[in-house]
Image: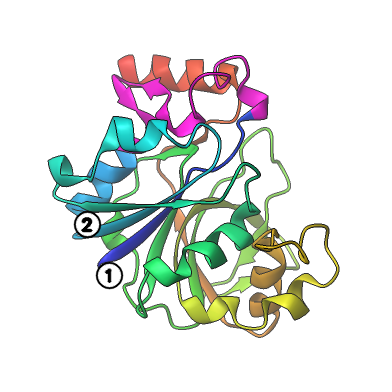
Amino acid sequence: MRHALIFAAGLGERMRPLTDRTPKPLLNVGGKPLIVWHLEKLAAAGVHYVVINTSHLAEQFPDALGDGSRWGLRIRYAYEGPTPLETGGGMLNALPLLGSEPFLVVSGDVWCDADFTILPTEPRGLAHLLMTDNPVHHPHGDFRLDALGRLHDDGEPRLTYSGIGVFRRELLDGWPEAVGDAPGADAKPPRFKLRPLLEAAIACGRVDGSHHRGAWTDVGTPARLAELEAELRG
């Protein structure tokens, strides 16, 4: 698995005023920008080529990260325009830069101590999602993981999708049918969430998962950022 995609295009509205002048993935935590933690882990996992989706304050990413050579990476930037394209639209927009093989996806606004080498380079189906225990702010979780490693959209107990996984580009095939008439789907370029595509693939038994029992934080608010900073500094 030589390619990766980092979602970094969000507006960071819940993080204001911190994100008024700095994109959320570039906020410092534990002595370095949040996104740098991901880049270091990607390089350690043998990834060589990283696409970073950008929108809000997009010009700051190449200024801060350059071409990726300091981590032994090659970074390309996929600008989504002034309005972020959501996770599904952002992935679709980045596909021309990602090649034909499965690619690792990381949400730019999470922190996780998982070793990316544990993820499969070739998912059995269309995707393999790293799942985590449900955080306080998302108590009901997203999907159920069975004993065979398959994900389901029904039953209990449910786990939370960490924002980290391995995807095949074929997941995006037929996205208009999965998304339907969702707002933004008919825009140019289209703007839509990834969730409906995952739900459709899960219904067909084509999404696997694994349970990460280590540390994970959705850095979605200033309070959570401060808590993570305290943990990393402690």
Q: Nearer the viewer, residue 93 or 112?
A: 93
Q: What percent of the width, then of the height, locates residue 7?
A: 49, 49
Q: Nearer the viewer, residue 30 or 108?
A: 108
In the image, taking residue 67 as reference, residue 200 lies left or right, namely: right
Label 2 sits on a secondary structure element that is loop
3D distance between C-alphas at marks 2 and 1: 9 Å
The C terminus is located in which quarter? Answer: top left
Q: Which residue is mark 2?
A: 45
Under mark 1, the amino acid is Met
* 14 is within the stretch colored magenta: yes
The crowd level at tag 2 (other Cα within 10 Å; few <14, some 14-19, many 20+) is some
Q: Position of residue 31 (x, y in %)?
A: 28, 19
Which residue lies at the image location 44% right of the left edge and 47% below the top edge? 213
Q: Is residue 201 magenta?
A: no
Label 1: which residue?
Answer: 1
Q: Would residue 148 be visible to someone looking at this image?
A: no
Residues under numbered marks 2 and 1 in contact, where contact means CB atoms less than 8 Å apart:
yes
Determine which of the numbered discs, if any, sits on residue 87 in the image: none
Residue 226 location, x and y as percent?
49, 15
Per the rendered image, the range of residues in magenta is 13-36
Closer to the camera, 151 or 198? 198
